[in-house]
Image (cartoon, rainbow, N blue to C red):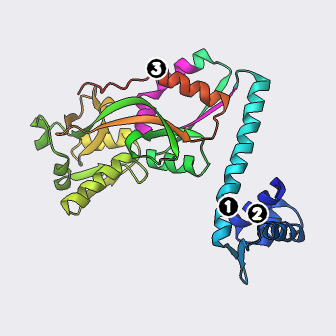
Amino acid sequence: MDLRQLTYFLTVCDTYSFTKAARKLRIAQPAITKAIQQLENEVGLPLFIREKRHVRLTMEGRVLKQHAIDIQQKIQQAKKELHDMKEGICGTVQVGIPSMSGSYYFPEKLAQFQEKYPDIDIDIYEAGTTEIERDILEGRLEMGTVVVDDVSNNLDIHPFLQESLMLVVSPSHPLAAHQAVSIEQLADEKLIVFKGGYYHRRIIEQVGASTKKDLSIAFETNQIAMAKSLTAKNFGVSVFLNMVVSKDEDVTAIPFDPPIVITLGIAHKKDLPLSKANRLFLSFLTKNADTSTSDQ
């Protein structure tokens, strides 16, 4: 079993076809067929079920696929590590960041980090925490921001921020006069929500499930400014981190009772070394962490 065979195997897994795999790799199909047959002979088990127009993995093939992905990732990581050692302090930080913390927490941290390490580039991948976690687990992203108490056991987590979730309403909304609200009250309101993949969306969906009510989704957007503007105009109510609305005079932020406090952390796969640039960024972020809940 060698790396070339595993590369051919994974390409067939991705394309469901020996012919398409050969085309993608720009090699002759018999080379693919021979490599897969050698693998199957070595393990003594069939890896694919051959059908007329495509192939699909056997149970044994699915097991090998996961190990092959892990092997490829470790080799890529080794290359990164060796390159970093050769080049010194340089490279690219690649980190997944959701829009709220990306807009209101990270800009200052990123500026401070780049001032300290001017030769390191920063590549931000913006998505919700749920999507970020999935991309890390599936090997598309090395590290990113997740909600600490809601992640896979296959990830290492480094907390860096605690924030309260707030109900946000127009100053003219009846709830604006309340000192606090229950999360269940969301079920009776028109809601302005983030699209799928965001933790806040999942919390709101859980309200619908727990109250057994059909939620009234008035608008879906991942644009913070639009969501706040619509909320200010009483188009609906929304849920934001406290940092997003604490200084905003156009809307009223109301704490939940009991409080909903989330801890954000940087996650990466266990037993998969980070690149030097990502290690430096992770160390910088955790040393400057703010894990005391912001004032409401």
Q: Is residue 106 left or right of residue 119?
A: left
Quadrant the N terminus occupies: bottom right
Q: Is residue 225 above or below residue 236?
A: above
Location of residue 107 in the rendering, given as x and y in whole percent from the top left corner: 48, 26
Asked whether 22 or 177 is in front, the reply is: 22
Q: Amino acid at mark 2?
A: Phe
Instruction: Name the side, left or right, on which 82 lies relative to 290.
Output: right
| Mark 1: few/some/many CA within 10 Å (<14, 14-19, 20+) | some
Residue 97: in sight, yes or no? no
Q: Which labelled disc corresponds to residue 9?
A: 2
Number of the label disc, if any, that sits on residue 65:
1
Q: Which residues are magenta?
A: 91-113
| Labelled pair 3, 1 in contact (Cβ < 8 Å) | no
- Rounded to the nearest angstrom, the CA distance separating label 3 from label 2 is 44 Å
**Of marks 1 and 2, which one's residue comes earlier in the chain?**
2
Nearest-to-viewer mark from 3 and 1: 1
* Residue 98 sits inside the magenta stretch: yes
Check disc 1 and give the amino acid type.
Lys
Residue, x 35% and y 30% (percent of image)? Answer: 162
Dividing the picture into quadrants, the one containing residue 244 is: top left
Observer able to see residue 156: yes
Q: Residue at x 18, y 40 (%)?
A: 258
**Label 2, residues with CA under 10 Å away: few <14, some 14-19, many ≥20:** many
